[in-house]
Image (spheres, grey):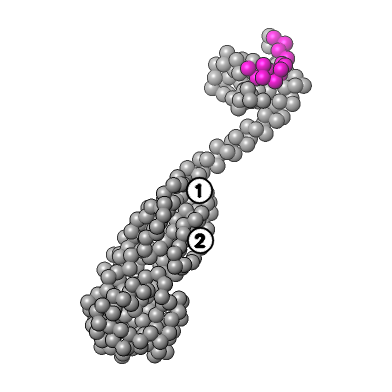
Amino acid sequence: MPDVELRHLAALAAVADEGSFGRAAARLGYTQSTVSQQIAALERAVGGPVFDRPGGPKPVRITPLGAVVLGHGRELLAQAERLADAVDRFNAGEGRIDIGTFQSVSNVILPAVVRRLRDEHPGCDIRLSEEEPEQPRIGDLDLLFYDGTLDGDVEHVKLLDEPYLLVTGRGVFPDGPVRLEQLDQAPMVAWPLTCDQPWMERALERSGARPRVVFRSAINDTLLSMVRAGLGSAVLPWLAIRAAEVQSDHRLRVHELRPSLPPREIHLHWPAARTRSPLAARAIAIAIEVAAEVATQIANPTRPVA
């Protein structure tokens, strides 16, 4: 029945509950004539009277047709109320968000983002997926962290310029910065030749350093275990070193490189063709805040990431 509106059903329920048009009007905040008009419109839509009106002080009584309409009407009103509540919660930042991430971000930046989102919106549904493909796609994700920019119909913000550092066993090099040429022919463990790794290794070569890569793994902890075992050193970005708490490991040393390599760029992407939810918009803002704190910690290593 396309002519039946929620306001008609609300008037029906109010009159049935209150027993009079006047009290129903007061409950709804309408005039009595407005309630009478809404009931009249409802009766035209359903094809018969929904109330018997005895007149005088006697209360109105719902008709059999009115009882049928009221039973279904209350269900529709309850559904509408649930819908309004869901929309309010969505606009307040509830709902679901799907975020793609990768190893280093998962260990340092993303936990702070997730914690703050959950503190602000305890009912939100956060779904995370961690992959490091050669050419990632945002697909159905709301947000995607990646150490570079993506092609296609996406928007992005650069979160962080992340320096590369050298991790060695204790005593391999004197304390302090290490010149790149000192890495020439030195044994090294490294990531596979995906993402930024080829670019980083070419940057080493341009500086006259051609290390001997003796082992490759995509797992940072595995690489660091091999450094501890004396297999070779590793050039890793700051987030990977921070996540593994290398600074507190007496078996390892972290050195700056001279000259420094161009930093790795961490970007956050989202689909350009889709309307962002309030939760996704808030997640972007929080990620920018957390990345700014990480940048401060890079400059001041004693300051923690909140």
* In this view, 107 is above or below 209: above
| Of the image marks 2 and 1, the number of the one nearer the N terminus | 1
Residue type for callout 2: Leu
* In this view, 306 is above or below 259: above
Q: In which quadrant of the rendered view does residue 206 lie?
A: bottom left
Q: Residues within 10 Å of mark 2 (few under 14, many from 20)?
A: some
User: Residue visible at 60% across and 15% down?
Assistant: 37
In the image, residue 250 lies at what x, y percent?
36, 85
Badge 2 is on which residue?
Answer: 128
Residue type for callout 1: Glu
* The stretch drawn in magenta includes residue 18: no
Q: In the depicted view, which residue is nearer to us: 81 or 241?
A: 241
Q: Quadrant of the C terminus?
A: bottom left
Badge 1 is on which residue?
Answer: 94
User: Residue visible at 55% across and 40% down?
Assistant: 85
Q: Which residues are magenta?
A: 41-55
Direction right: furthest residue: 64
